[in-house]
Amino acid sequence: MFTKFKMSCLDYAASVFEKLRLPSNEDKMRTLKEHRYHRSLDEFLMRCDQEPVMLKWIRGNFGRILEMLPTTSPDETIRFIGVGCGNGIMDVEMLKMATKHFRHLHNIGIDPNHEALAGFKDRVRKEPAMNKVNIEWILGTAERFNCGSGLAMRKDTPKSHLIHMLHMLYHVKSMEGAIQKYYNMLLDGGVLLITLASRVNNQLYNTFKKFETLQSNQTKSSQVERNDKRYSDDVITVLDKLDFHYTMESVEYRLDISGCLEKEMTEGGKLLLDFVCLTNAARSYETLSEENQRTLIECLKDSCSSTDDGKNHVKLSFDIITVVKPSCGAEKQANGVK
């Protein structure tokens, strides 16, 4: 296995700032310290089954995507890019499947978090199938890899067969810009795979909409900014505007919020509330007024359902969007593909 690791302090600092900055007015900006942000994200992933659900989807559906990829010969190097790859759990699963289809694979994993990339490298070391893959790790943001002078794609850089952007378009400055530029990095016939939260069948989304409504009679200074989180329908709006071909599939999963509802809230419960508030209400739970904290907890209680084991869950969903770049001169396809 061949590996490379490129680091850019400028990219890392910029990514941390962008990830921790909340989309509100400057004078009302609220942030979480970097370490707590990552702890809150880890708590969210531990309390939900998003990762197992996505892994199941990959195992059941990624084979057909591999069959779609444009190839010219058995000796061709098949090129993947994982944008916002994190700890590589999805990348490794896809690459394991790809090794059964192709002799030569090259993968680039891009992420602004040093610890996440270290986890990716460790995961690769433990997986024998990864010995067949040439892997390059980039510590940096999607924007810097795409546009920055230090990490830009050179004109002679080969284009890719597959690029995936899994739950990462929340963090880019321009969603349209990121989609367009990585689409341009695809070979004709290549695939761009995108996942993003859906507003449909999303009890957290409904909870925070109700939360916003209940605040309507509060004074302006105590109100929480409206939910400006990006959702899959925002991606569809961009794809339609760019006239890209795509299909979409919705997947449901559950989040255990039991720790958030206990009278004596655990540290895990506080971390989880920080994460869901940060991603749905533009500020962390700890910065809400006591009145808003009580209101939010009541909204969560109304939204959740109990299971036989006494746990309280909310239903969530995300959409998996497969964008296919047409071959030169190819006509647009029907059959559900725009």
Image (tube, helix red, strand yellow):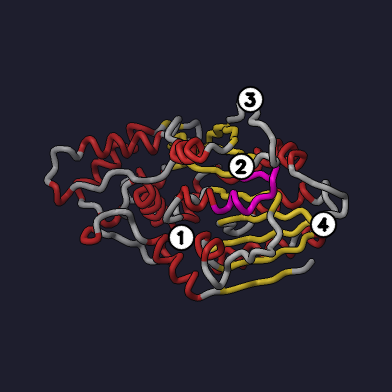
Q: Which residue is drawn at 69% across and 53% down?
A: 160
Element at label 4: strand
Q: Which of marks 2 and 3 is nearer the N terminus?
A: 2
Label annotation for residue 104: 4
Q: Mark 1 to mark 3: distance in Å?
A: 45 Å
Element at label 3: loop
Read off the magenta span: 181-192
Q: Mark 1 to mark 4: distance in Å?
A: 37 Å
Q: Quarter of the image containing the C terminus?
A: top right
Provide the residue designation for mark 3: 334
State the image coordinates of residue 82 (x, y, percent, origin top left).
62, 55
Label 1 Cα neighbours within 10 Å, binned few <14 / some 14-19 / many ≥20:
some
Q: Which residue lies furthest to the front in this view?
A: 329
Q: Quarter of the image containing the N terminus?
A: bottom right
Q: Mark 2 to mark 1: distance in Å?
A: 21 Å
State the image coordinates of residue 106 (x, y, percent, origin top left).
74, 59
Q: Residue at x 80, y 46 (%)?
A: 71
Q: Mark 4 to mark 2: distance in Å?
A: 25 Å
Q: Which of marks 1 and 4 is nearer the N terminus?
A: 1
Residue 85 falls within the magenta-colored stretch: no
Which numbered mark, 2 or 1, is in the foreground of this view? 2
Residue 8 in view here: yes
Label annotation for residue 54: 2
Label 3 Cα neighbours within 10 Å, binned few <14 / some 14-19 / many ≥20:
few
Residue 317 in view here: no
